Image (cartoon, helix red, strand yellow):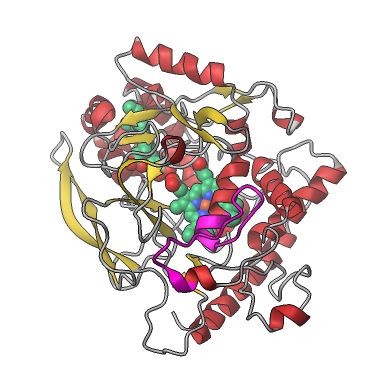
Amino acid sequence: MKQTRLVTLAASLALLAGLWTVHHEANTGNPPGAGQVPAHAAYLQPVPGLAPDQMQTFRAGEKVFNNFWIAIPNAVISKWWDLSQPGPGGGGWGLGPTFLATSCVSCHVQAGRGRMPDTGAGPLFQQTLRLSIAGEGPHGSPNPEPNYGLQLQSFDIIDSKDQSRQAGEAEVHVDWKQRSFRLADGETVALREPSIRIEKLNFGPLAAGTMTSLRNTQAIAGLGYLEAVSEEDILALAARQKTQGLNGRPNYVRDDIGERVAIGRFGWKANQPSLRQQIAAAFRHDIGITSSLYPTQNCPPVQKACRQEIVPDKPELSDELWRQVAFWATALDAPRPADASPAALRGEKLFEQVRCAQCHVPELKTGAFPELPALANKRIRPYTDLLLHDMGPDLADGRPDFRAGGSDWRTPPLWGVGRSKQVNGSTSFLHDGRARNLLEAIVWHGGEAAASRDAFARLSKAEREDLLAFLQAL
Ligand code: HEC
Ligand code: HEC
């Protein structure tokens, strides 16, 4: 992407963020009761009980999430421009050298999930394509592709007089193959299966045997509560599932902050142990912003121009902004369920009956949580076990991620799934956004969830609709 297009992109994102702020400011104020939250802001509420100074940090962190980052124009300008001051977008300097987006909010619109395009025409921009080769990287992490790293970045800031130069690492497109699933009463559900097409690889072909994993942007409300569930409780859930014929397992990943092994909680394969780390990793890989945790730019050796870009003498993300945005993410309240209709109440029983609830465990409790005591010792209803399950060959990406195997995925929380469409228009479900609605998401279940899916497929149409009404009300 050329510089001018980049400027246009930045400007339109700023506009988007600006419009969003207007909507949201009309809705400030402490915990709104159920029904008082505008539908588009369902994922953006603070948890009840924040003290005034915490509320200030929450609002500051929300700004960091919305603001866009820009490139340091060049070495000359950076001499007379005070780079300790925010850039024109209110965010910071230091975008890139390579990146996927200029702000968090451009992927997580209204803190919601990404939208998968229906055709292969345009390159993806709210999804990431993870890469790795066989073997393990440091601390058991995936082994980066030598010339492109752990993820393809589609854009760069690298100034070039050569207008024919292809910018960014590559473009990722997805083409859809049609297939269908037959329910017991003969009705068929049309499905689409993604097939990834990588174009304009700027640094030669991918290494032989490169594994890829397409991941859609996740919704991020309520995650502080999930961080506050104790490790013992997660292990107890895994032990209980063994007695039910399931094989839910925690992922064990590298905690770079605590410099230890920890249970993974976040990401589609639970490859991140904490929100602080997840966010620092997003800054580095998605926006090209260094932090005190990840101080080096993301430039594989072959990417010489990337390596020659300005090396900041301090992290581009200050510890203060990192703390603020992590606090905001931690303090985002869980989406409130809608008032349950009779259909939704019947659906809730069916959800138990066909054993969705074995993995999508309705109720968990949080433990001690000194980081934010408002989240401690609470009963929560997230509909997850935070465990990995083998979901079968159809959903497999074939790419291990720490202890998660090629067909393992973490049970995603279901709170708020019914709000997704009003939040930002997206109803792209599952890790790669292949499901266009909740029904498709269910029938894609396989592996450990095959028996539950088949029990669902044997329900009558009226019962299936009740179950969907229940999910829609979450
Ligand atoms: C290019 C799009 C993109 C950008 C930009 C982006 N994210 Fe994400 N985000 C994702 C994707 C994709 C995932 C899932 C990653 C995975 O499973 O590997 C994710 C996952 C997350 C999660 C974990 C969600 C969960 O349920 O476990 C959090 C928290 C998060 N992002 C916060 C942020 C913050 C804060 C920023 C800004 C620094 C940011 N993201 C920037 C695409 C993006
Ligand atoms: C064996 C554990 C297991 C069972 C049983 C199970 N699920 Fe899931 N569910 C998962 C996992 C893991 C995923 C993520 C799969 C992926 O992204 O590829 C998932 C994804 C989903 C999603 C998409 C959520 C999102 O954010 O994209 C929905 C909706 C869902 N399940 C509903 C159900 C329903 C309804 C049932 C019962 C008919 C059910 N599940 C049974 C483990 C399970």
Q: Is residue 319 magenta?
A: no
Looking at the image, residue 48 sits to the left or right of residue 431; the answer is right
For the N terminus, the quadrant is bottom left
Asked whether the viewer can see residue 219, the reply is no
Given the current orientation, which residue lies at the most extreme right position? 52
The residue closer to the viewer here, 194 or 168, is 168
Asked whether the viewer can see residue 397, the reply is yes
The residue at the point 28 percent across, 44 percent down is 397
Looking at the image, residue 457 sits to the left or right of residue 282; the answer is left
Magenta-tinted stretch? 283-305
Residue 346, position as x, y percentages in the image: 41, 28
Residue 61, position as x, y percentages in the image: 72, 53
Residue 186, position as x, y percentages in the image: 13, 40
The chief SS type of the magenta part is loop
Residue 440, position as x, y percentages in the image: 29, 45
Q: Is residue 298 magenta?
A: yes
The residue closer to the viewer here, 407 or 53, is 407
User: Measured along the vertical axis of the image, is residue 326 above or below residue 129?
Assistant: above
User: Measured along the vertical axis of the image, is residue 468 above or below residue 237?
Assistant: below
**Residue 13 location, quadrant:** bottom right
Given the current orientation, which residue lies at the most extreme left position? 186
